Image: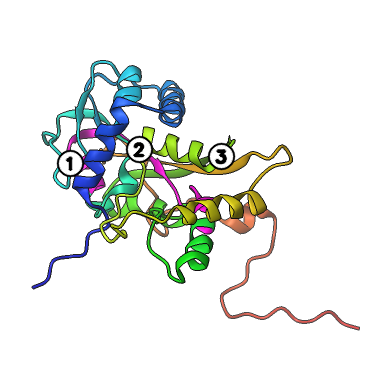
């Protein structure tokens, strides 16, 4: 039996996060934490036993000061049924098994407990992905994975149902950041621990010409009128509840007490009937 291919080099990711902790650039995580705080304020429930899952928990701990924090390892260090809120904080995009992460989060919740997962989505850094591919083709005649592939909102919403959550909701928020140079963008990625930790990445030191060509392509295709480079960051928010008998449930087929035709004021016809064409 062969091992399942891994998306992420966990050792490299850990080293990148340790480097980021020394010189953090966490403004996007601060934005995510502020959004989390606003969402929680709109829920008519007080959470007293929260847990945070992720490698850079600081901004989220500020929102949930009494929380337990654990790393986003393959096996989450959470006790079953011990939390009323789990925040999977800006790390699910690095998961080899995102559904497994969500299932473990659900098992850590008590009945009617809430999960909020926040992570980067498929539009994130699409500009950087494009220019690096073009630059590498021109410089070396080939391609290597340099930007993490991320899921589309339409596909990611189904993860909650697969993981067994009730009342699932998926939405997103897009932030565009302006940079003077490609180096400034890479500095911020390092400060968030979000540089390349793909398991199948090219390990050799990149040719300087690659980044020179990439910046040239960036300025040609993804800059504004003032000459700033534009970088897109898409944040995905998945919200779901651990099942509980008090939650709303869909009606059984055939249990409706009214007819749709009556509500719409139209004539109801049995299936298979055809409407005659108008007379000339």
Circles 3 and 2: CB atoms closer than 8 Å: no
Q: Is residue 54 above or below residue 203?
A: above
The answer to whether mark 3 and mark 1 are in CB contact below 8 A is no
Q: Position of residue 80 (x, y in %)?
A: 12, 36
Q: Which residues are magenta?
A: 101-130
Name the residue carrying label 1. Answer: 107
Q: How far from the left and from the top, in percent, is residue 198?
A: 30, 54
Element under disc 3: loop
Instruction: Give the crowd class for mark 2: few <14, some 14-19, many >=20 residues within 10 Å.
Output: many
Place residue 277 in its image quadrant: bottom right
Q: Is residue 210 left or right of residue 179?
A: left
Kindly report which numbered mark, 1 or 2, lies closer to the viewer in this rendering: 2
Decide if residue 31 is in sight here.
yes
Q: Residue at x 18, y 43 (%)?
A: 73
Label 2: state its secondary structure: loop
Task: Report whether 12 appears left or right of 150.
Answer: left
Question: What residue would you read off at disc 3?
Answer: 181
Between residues 163 and 101, which one lies in front from this camera angle?
Answer: 101
């Amino acid at each position: 039996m062969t091992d399942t291919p891994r998306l992420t080099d966990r050792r490299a990711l850990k080293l990148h996060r340790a480097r980021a902790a020394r010189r953090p650039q966490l403004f996007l995580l601060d934005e995510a934490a502020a959004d989390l705080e606003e969402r929680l304020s709109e829920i008519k429930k007080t959470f007293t036993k929260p847990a945070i899952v992720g490698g850079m928990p600081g901004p989220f701990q500020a929102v949930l000061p009494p929380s337990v924090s654990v790393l986003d390892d393959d096996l989450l260090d959470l006790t079953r049924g011990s939390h009323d809120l789990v925040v999977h904080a800006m790390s699910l995009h690095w998961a080899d098994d995102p559904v497994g992460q969500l299932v473990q989060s659900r098992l850590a919740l008590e009945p009617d407990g809430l999960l909020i997962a926040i992570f980067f989505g498929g539009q994130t850094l699409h500009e950087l992905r494009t220019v690096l591919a073009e630059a590498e083709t021109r410089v070396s005649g080939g391609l290597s994975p340099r930007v993490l592939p991320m899921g589309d909102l339409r596909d990611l919403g189904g993860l909650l149902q697969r993981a067994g959550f009730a009342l699932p909701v998926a939405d997103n928020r897009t932030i565009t950041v302006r940079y003077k140079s490609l180096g400034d963008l890479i500095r911020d990625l390092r400060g968030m621990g979000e540089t390349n930790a793909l398991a199948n990445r090219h390990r050799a030191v990149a040719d300087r010409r690659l980044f020179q060509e990439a910046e040239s392509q960036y300025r040609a295709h993804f800059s504004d009128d003032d000459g700033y480079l534009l970088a897109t960051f898409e944040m995905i928010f998945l919200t779901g509840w651990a099942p509980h008998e008090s939650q709303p449930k869909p009606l059984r087929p055939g249990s409706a007490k009214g007819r749709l035709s009556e509500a719409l004021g139209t004539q109801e016809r049995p299936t298979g009937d055809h409407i005659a064409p108008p007379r000339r």
